[in-house]
Image (cartoon, grey):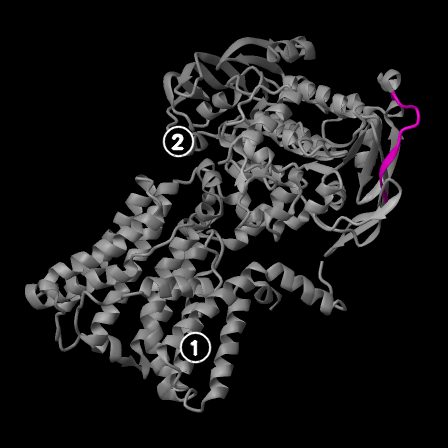
């Protein structure tokens, strides 16, 4: 079913470059990797997939030298070796692009690319060589960035590409990419794939970890799927399809990727009239009805997030008006919007959403402490019972009740934030990339939550870079461009190609 | 019991008990009623000031100014009593109020003017003491009021009064942090200011409130110190801000904010005073005492940093009993 067959290798007898044999790694209370074996061939892109907590990251870290397995062997060209440290792994030709950026935001692009191995001439750093070399690396990637640019001033997508530039600058034979496209738009993903195919044709091995199924199937030559620390499937990509991966990842049949329920009514809930902010939202008007999911389509930087920020009171309106249930509201800060029944599930859970110093219940109640206040005082008992009911209702892991949220999976963390807004009796839910970085099983759970919200006459504004998801889960889609809405259509009339056309321009 | 064993207080508390036992074994002059009530008196000023420092630390801030505030507030108290002639019942509440105002000023600069807390209070550390020296030509003011020293040396059913202040104010602080919305919001702001804002919390106001609490705590410290010596002096409280921060840290509060317990500060302050007292009784010179406190700070924070690793290796060691 895949089209890779014709390019299924230049070399009919690919060289076995790296081999993991029966890797086992234990952490307190968890068997993260159980007897995992994996073969990486030169000139092959190998997909590594699996739900959150399946052991992908642990496995990658063994190859990157970050930690060593408890048992099992790592072989390089059939020789057993050990990778004692990240530096050691790098010297043996492994370059890793981790999910969390390892760039230093205050340094320049060139300094970041050569960090830790800045060339020295006569005892001094050779700045000319650094910038020249960095330039040639960027050229290889066809990146039009200044090597003197400060990393913190780049967009997230550009930072991700610099991260990749840093990895390939070492001339590594094995490149590990952990969720490289999480922050990228469609054009950048295409660009990245071109780069990866080029590196593959140069005979490098690539280990590619991603949650985006469609994209993985498009690019990889072989796939290994992990579940609960074990290999549940490995196959040439020509043999696999998306449903197969979804099934193996979550363990049972999922008939429907997108379990969309249509709950849209004709009662207006949120009405925007020509709103405008200093942050570039320009003359945006639309009406969101009870039970409706409105998708905002558009690229990063098209103004999607800015529109959410305006509604949530982060960027106050300078013009236009906003009504909830027919009542005019004047949102000068998030609190004003929250009090009017608006909720924001931010794109970046870690920085803007979760309190890692709190356990589940405190994270759930924080947006409306009045629900657990009795006679002016917080009631720990009420907090526990209320949280317990949300945990059951949203099927959050029961560990949430007495564990710090940092120990929960991405999907459970996302549900905690949604529970927070249910506790605050919000009616309009602004979901900014709600399924980014969470596994398929958890994604389905988020879709079911969206259904749950709309079935209770609440409404959702969905921002998502996953076009399939956006089209499938929305009732109507507003196309955003340059801070304004260029078109508003029923989702059924929008095709993926439409979105791709507007976004890649 | 299980909950208590998991509580973040258990580590610092056992450390304090260990220190207590070591000192008790090192000299038989330690476990006497006289010496122990002496310790209670000694710890009271730092312990009260540390309540405020700890609450500011919970919000992710730091307060370097309470020492200088104590000097200024003690001079204000002395002037109000001695030169203005106000009775104690008016002068003391007034000084507490002024302490709150000074704290509010620190908080205003930090939260609303967005000057980092370290800088705001470093400026305060210098300026407040400077203002203290403007009173009475920079000379201490003595013999304030015949009743004033009773506030420190008096007792209630043979319990020294400072001990009662400590118990009452710490109970109030523990209660406030656990049962009020403001207490919860203080932890939220320290844990993740951005998420706090997006959860509808007025982050600036919470930071301001934390500094007001710190100002009030400094005022209590100032009144206690002034009554102990029945005087006000611009030289009071030198270095007390660092002792208060050290108490919080030794007690286990995280300087990153959002984590800790108010009692951490009391445990930390007691640990410091017990060590100092033990070294005194064993005739160790002051210079060596300062070095010892420094080492204790490092060990306390080190243990906090390496807690997980230590826990893991202990678990390995006693692997017959494994939770999870």
Question: Dot 2 lies on which element?
Answer: loop
Q: Circle 1 is placed at which residue position? A: B275
Cα separation between marks 1 and 2: 49 Å
Question: Residue A471's x, y, as percent?
Answer: 66, 17
Q: Nearer the viewer, residue A143 or B4?
A: A143
The residue tagged 2 is: A333
**Does the magenta-highlighted stretch encompass residue A18?**
yes
Q: Is residue A330 left or right of residue A465?
A: left
Chain letter belonging to callout 2: A
Q: Nearer the viewer, residue B204 or B20?
A: B20
Crowd class of label 2 (few under 14; some 14 to 19; many from 20; radius 10 Å): many
A337 w.r.t. A7: above or below? below
Residue that appears at 54% across and 45% down: A363
Task: Looking at this view, name the residue that lies furthest to the right.
Answer: A13
- Residue at x-position 62% and y-position 12%: A504
Q: Is residue A490 above or below residue B22?
A: above
| Quadrant in the picture for residue A14 | top right
**From what the image shows, is residue A306 above or below residue A121?**
above
Q: Nearer the viewer, residue B164 or B216?
A: B216
Position of residue A343 measured from the top left corner of the image (x, y, whole percent)? 51, 31
- Crowd around label 1: few <14 · some 14–19 · many ≥20 (10 Å): many
Point 78% across, 24% down: residue: A202
Q: Which residues are magenta?
A: A9-22
- Rendering quarter of residue A275: top left
């Amino acid at each position: 079913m895949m089209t890779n067959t014709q390019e299924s290798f230049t070399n009919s007898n690919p060289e076995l470059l790296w081999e993991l044999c029966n890797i086992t790694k234990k952490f307190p209370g968890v068997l993260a990797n159980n007897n995992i074996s994996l073969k990486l061939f030169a000139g092959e892109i190998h997909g590594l997939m699996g739900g959150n907590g399946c052991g992908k990251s642990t496995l990658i870290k063994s190859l990157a030298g970050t930690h060593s397995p408890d048992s099992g062997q790592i072989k390089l060209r059939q020789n057993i070796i050990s990778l004692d440290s990240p530096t050691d792994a790098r010297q043996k030709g492994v370059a890793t692009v981790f999910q969390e950026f390892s760039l230093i935001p205050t340094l320049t692009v060139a300094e970041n690319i050569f960090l830790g191995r800045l060339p020295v001439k006569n005892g001094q750093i050779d700045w000319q060589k650094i910038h020249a070399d960095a330039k040639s690396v960027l050229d290889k990637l066809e990146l039009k960035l200044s090597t003197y640019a400060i990393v913190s001033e780049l967009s997230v997508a550009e930072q991700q590409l610099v991260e990749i530039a840093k990895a390939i600058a070492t001339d590594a034979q094995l490149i590990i990419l952990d969720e490289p496209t999480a922050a990228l738009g469609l054009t950048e993903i295409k660009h990245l794939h071109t780069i990866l195919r080029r590196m593959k044709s140069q005979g490098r091995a690539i280990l590619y970890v991603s949650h985006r199924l469609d994209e993985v199937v498009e690019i990889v030559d072989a796939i290994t799927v992990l579940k609960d620390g074990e290999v549940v499937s490995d196959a040439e990509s020509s043999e696999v399809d998306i449903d197969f991966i979804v099934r193996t990842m979550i363990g049972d049949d999922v008939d429907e990727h997108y379990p969309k329920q249509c709950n849209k009514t004709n009662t207006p809930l949120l009405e925007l009239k020509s709103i405008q902010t200093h942050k570039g939202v320009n003359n945006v008007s639309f009406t969101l009805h009870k039970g409706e999911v409105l998708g905002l389509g558009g690229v990063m930087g098209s103004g999607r997030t800015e529109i959410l920020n305006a509604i949530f009171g982060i960027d106050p309106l300078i013009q236009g008006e906003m009504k909830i249930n027919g009542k005019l509201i004047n949102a000068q800060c998030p609190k004003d919007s929250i009090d009017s029944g608006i909720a924001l599930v931010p794109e970046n859970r870690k920085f803007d959403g979760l309190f890692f110093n709190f356990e589940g219940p405190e994270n759930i109640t924080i947006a409306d402490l009045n629900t657990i206040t009795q006679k002016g005082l917080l009631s720990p008992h009420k907090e526990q019972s209320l949280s317990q009911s949300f945990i059951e209702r949203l099927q959050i892991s029961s560990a949430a009740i007495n564990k710090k949220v940092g120990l929960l999976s991405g999907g459970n963390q996302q549900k905690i934030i949604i529970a927070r807004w249910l506790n605050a009796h919000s009616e309009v839910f602004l979901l900014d990339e709600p399924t980014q970085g969470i596994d398929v099983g958890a994604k389905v759970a988020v879709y079911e939550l969206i259904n749950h919200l709309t079935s209770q006459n609440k409404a959702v504004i969905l921002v998502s870079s996953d076009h399939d998801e956006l089209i499938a889960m929305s009732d109507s889609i507003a196309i955003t461009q340059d801070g304004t809405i260029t078109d508003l259509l029923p989702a059924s009339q929008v095709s993926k190609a439409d979105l791709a056309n507007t976004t890649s321009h | 019991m299980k909950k208590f064993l998991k509580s973040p207080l258990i580590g610092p508390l056992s450390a304090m008990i260990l220190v207590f036992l070591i000192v008790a074994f090192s000299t038989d002059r330690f476990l006497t009623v006289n010496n122990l009530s002496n310790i209670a008196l000694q710890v009271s000023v730092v312990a009260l000031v540390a309540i405020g420092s700890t609450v500011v630390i919970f919000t992710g801030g730091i307060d370097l100014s309470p020492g200088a505030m104590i000097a200024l507030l003690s001079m204000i108290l002395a002037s109000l009593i001695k030169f203005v002639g106000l009775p104690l019942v008016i002068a003391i509440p007034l000084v507490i109020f002024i302490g709150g105002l000074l704290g509010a000023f620190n908080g205003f600069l930090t939260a609303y003017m967005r000057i980092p807390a370290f800088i705001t209070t470093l400026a305060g550390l210098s300026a407040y003491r400077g203002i203290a020296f403007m009173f009475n030509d920079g000379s201490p003011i003595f013999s304030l009021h015949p009743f004033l020293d009773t506030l420190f040396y008096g007792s209630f059913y043979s319990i020294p009064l400072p001990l009662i202040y400590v118990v009452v104010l710490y109970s109030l602080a523990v209660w406030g942090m656990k049962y009020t919305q403001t207490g919860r919001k203080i932890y939220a702001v320290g844990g993740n200011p951005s998420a706090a804002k997006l959860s509808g919390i007025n982050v600036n106001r919470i930071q301001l409130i934390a500094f007001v609490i710190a100002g009030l705590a400094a005022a209590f410290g100032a009144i206690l110190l002034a009554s102990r010596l029945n005087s006000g002096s611009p030289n009071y409280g030198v270095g007390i801000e660092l002792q208060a921060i050290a108490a919080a840290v030794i007690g286990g509060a995280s300087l990153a904010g959002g984590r800790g317990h108010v009692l951490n500060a009391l445990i930390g302050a007691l640990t410091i005073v017990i060590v100092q007292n033990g070294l005194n009784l064993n005739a160790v010179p002051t210079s060596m005492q300062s070095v010892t406190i420094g080492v204790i700070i490092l060990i306390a924070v080190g243990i906090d940093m390496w807690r997980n690793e230590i826990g893991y290796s202990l678990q390995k060691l006693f692997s017959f009993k494994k939770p999870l």
